[in-house]
Image: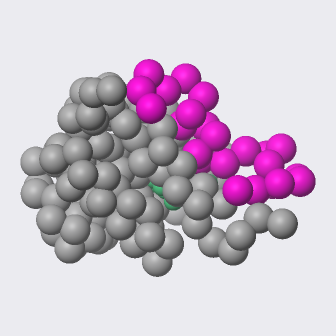
Amino acid sequence: MSRYTRILLAVDLTDECEHVAERAVQLAQECNCELHVIHVLEPMSIAYGGDVPTDLAAIQGCVQEQAASQLQEFAHSIGVPSERQHLACGRTESEIRRVACEADADVIVVGSHGRHGLSLLLGSTANGVLNGARCDVLAVRVGSPAR
Ligand code: AMP
């Protein structure tokens, strides 16, 4: 079986992403391949249904700057250089899939809470990424174990 050549690690920049990143770094070392990292910002008009009463552009600019510096710090901490860091803006799942294609990644590494019940019906980022992905998707369990 051929080895992976390029991994795209999706991070939400919460504490949990360190565990997901560990798996991606390990896989990259085992396969001796390139590791890319992506963080997606959802435009406030998507997150709040277009109903935000203040100057959206200014707030969005601040949020974007802060996310860019957090992503840079996190990516450097796991040894991913700037040219392999991707900050995207849009729907999280579709942006992750789009950048995976653009970067020619053959596997996406994403965290999964192993949801069940109502939250499973509402969906998760991991499910959304898997749905329509053109490459493999590795879902790394995060949070407390599913019962
Ligand atoms: P969730 O289903 O939203 O709890 O997220 C689970 C996983 O999806 C995270 O561990 C990340 O791998 C990925 N993810 C969630 N939100 C983002 C985001 N804004 N940008 C990139 N990846 C994300």
Q: Residue 84 in the image: x percent, y percent? A: 16, 48
Q: Residue 138 in the image: x percent, y percent? A: 48, 44
Tell me which residue sits at (26%, 70%) in the image. Answer: 74
As for residue 108 lying within the magenta part, the answer is: no
Query: Which residue occupies the extreme front position in the image?
Result: 1
Tell me which residue sits at (61%, 37%) in the image. Answer: 128
Using the rendered view, name the quadrant where residue 82 is placed: bottom left
Q: Which residues are magenta?
A: 114-136
As for residue 131 lying within the magenta part, the answer is: yes
Question: Do we see residue 35 in this rendering?
Answer: yes
Please give the count of numbered marks on the rendered protein: 0
Query: Which residue occupies the extreme right position in the image?
Result: 117
Q: Residue 101 in the image: x percent, y percent? A: 32, 26
Q: Is residue 2 above or below residue 6?
A: above
Q: In this rendered view, identify the residue nearer to me: 65 or 59.
A: 65
Tell me which residue sits at (42%, 27%) in the image. Answer: 135
Tell me which residue sits at (44%, 63%) in the image. Answer: 20
